[in-house]
Amino acid sequence: MSRQHMMWMQSELESLRERGQYRSLVDSEPRPGGWVIRSGRRMLNLASNQYLGTDLLQIRQELGAFPAGMGAGASRLITGHHPLCTRLEEEFARCKGTESCLLFSSGYMANTGVIPALVGRSDCVFSDRLNHASIIDGIVLSRAQCFRYPHRDLDRLEDQLKKAPRGAKKLIVTDSIFSMDGSMAPLRELAELKDRYEAILMVDEAHSGGLYGEEGQGLVHAMGLTSRVEVQMGTFSKAYCAYGGYIAGDSMLKDYLINKARSFIFTTALPPAVISAVYQSWQSVRGHSVRRDELQRKAEMFRQRLQEAGFDTGGSECHIVPLVLGSNEKTLRVSEKLQQEGVAAVAIRPPTVPEGTARIRFSLMAIHSDEDLKWALERIIRIGREEA
């Protein structure tokens, strides 16, 4: 790489440091009970998306070793369609209450492949401003006209739907649970708008899959909206403690995406060992109704205690509880002090969240003990007040 290239990269990195937006990788090893070894220090892990605390190693011991095969060989349309794919997709679809399911290599690959397959240059996408980056990137790749409506603002969304060009396909896309705020999408109202304006509704269940519904089917299922949401997307990398993404819907949708979703067609399939791990972890999570209830109880206690202490928890109403601090510098200081005292609390800054809303994102796990959470809360409240 030329010196000129190195100079502009160095300049951009220095700018990120000055704005408090520089990021770096840190070693992290999970430990039992919701703890982690981070940079050699034992900390209570309040930064993981494995919300139910599913232990994949324990599942492997209970159900047996995963099948051999760390390489799929090619894309699923060439030689990579292992029978395990069929089994997982068929059984998962039955659990979700949909006609079909299509497995993708990751949630990011699902969103960036499916959205451009559904809409193009002459079409319109309506996206909540706080949607995940993978949704935003999928919209960019589609080249469709994008209307971003303020977070959960149904009146603005309806105004935008009215302005859509005649004949254009209309796609409404939203997270079910917004990963940095812990707020929930108004799914019933979105389904009503979708019907009224003849749009397609796509819901990203990444942070609700495994956690809502009698078997963790997700928020769409728990609200009785399965038949009214054309496209359900999700990931197995959060509560399911594995890897991969999926799209669930009717059988024609699956056939269409197999033929049109570029991130499905042109990528190597997941390894058979990974698919087996997904299947076994999903089966385990289906039976974790007690953990699902415990997670929400603990999150309510955690959020209420922070609010009583005068802190801003944003629009949180679930297992994700942000501590909104505002400036990047203050957030970084609080994060560092918490980590020094044994609380793994990561600073979330722009562009992940809007400017001026930097925060510590606490994501609770069902396996956290009440005692450990109260221990962490004492430190969070004290340090937060010190930096006020």
Image: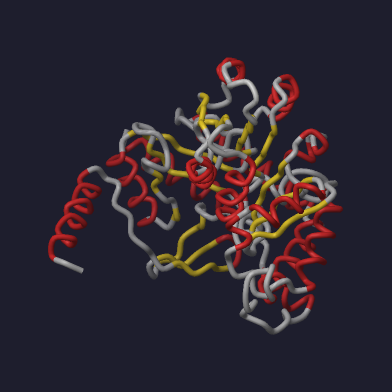
Q: Nearer the viewer, residue 138 or 221?
A: 138
Quadrant location, the C terminus: top left
Q: Is residue 308 above or below residue 272?
A: above
Q: Position of residue 95 (x, y in %)?
A: 84, 52
Residue 15 can be seen, yes or no: yes
Which residue corresponds to the image point at 57% horizontal and 34% vertical from the top-left? 316
Quadrant location, the N terminus: bottom left
Figure disc tally: 0
Q: Nearer the viewer, residue 3 or 349?
A: 3
Which residue corresponds to the image point at 58% horizontal and 21% vertical from the top-left? 165
Q: Quadrant of residue 382?
A: top left
Residue 377 can be seen, yes or no: no
Instruction: Name the colour scheme.
Output: secondary structure
Q: Position of residue 204 (x, y in %)?
A: 64, 43
Which residue corresponds to the image point at 66% horizontal and 50% vertical from the top-left? 234
Which residue corresponds to the image point at 79% horizontal and 64% vertical from the top-left? 88
Q: Is residue 366 above or below residue 166?
A: below
Left or right: residue 10 compared with residue 58: left
Q: Is residue 366 above or below residue 306?
A: below
Q: Is residue 55 above or below residue 249?
A: below
